[in-house]
Amino acid sequence: MLRSETETRVGGHVRRRAAGRIAIACAIALGWLPGGILRADDPLVVLNNASRAAYRHAKEAALARSGPVILVEGDVLVLRRGSERAEVRFLPEIYHPLKAFAHIPLAVDVLLRQVGDGDASGAPGRLDDRLLDELRRYRR
């Protein structure tokens, strides 16, 4: 049986949402998100810590063997040469405030996308009370 494009899109959306919920439930059960608690001596925590330590040691060894390497760590450029490390902040101070302002139209667009394109007759979508309240909260 062939599915229409709409059925395929909706079915895929439902499967993705279900998979996301399952992943969140597993993460909570394993203690990766609030709601689940893993002790420091839990085998999964011990294994994770050992894996991270192995990665850290391998990274340090690779950096020690290589020539000069430039790394980007957030706002900082790092020059590594053997065991030497030099850092310099490369983003200007104004970057983060400008980025915050740039997020404003993105947030408004995301909020207004909930209105939709309207109905089949071409009538525009409508803002409901919940969305109006959300927009008012955002404006504050």
Image: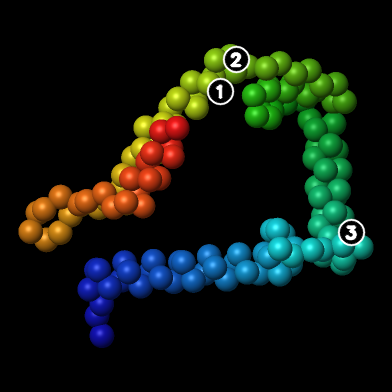
Q: In the displayed structure, would residue 133 be above or below residue 12?
A: above
Colouring scheme, one of rainbow, by chain, secondary structure, one colour: rainbow
Residue at mark 3 to residue at mark 2: CA–CA distance: 39 Å
Question: Which amino acid type is marked by label 3?
Answer: Ala
Sooner in the amino-acid sequence: mark 1 or mark 3: 3
Which numbered circle lies on residue 40? 3
Where the C terminus falls, by quadrant? top left
The structure residue drawn at horizontal position 26% and vertical position 85%, both measured from the top left corner, is 1
User: Is the residue marked by circle 3 packed among few (<14), some (14-19), or many (20+) residues within 10 Å?
Assistant: few
- The residue indicated by pointer 2 is 93
Q: Which residue is mark 1?
A: 96
User: Mark 1 and 2 residues: CB-CB less than 8 Å, in contact?
Assistant: yes
Q: Amino acid at mark 2?
A: Glu
Mark earlier in primary sequence (3, 2): 3
Name which residue type carries label 1.
His
Q: Position of residue 61 (x, y in %)?
A: 85, 38
Q: Is residue 89 above or below residue 51?
A: above
Cα separation between marks 1 and 2: 7 Å
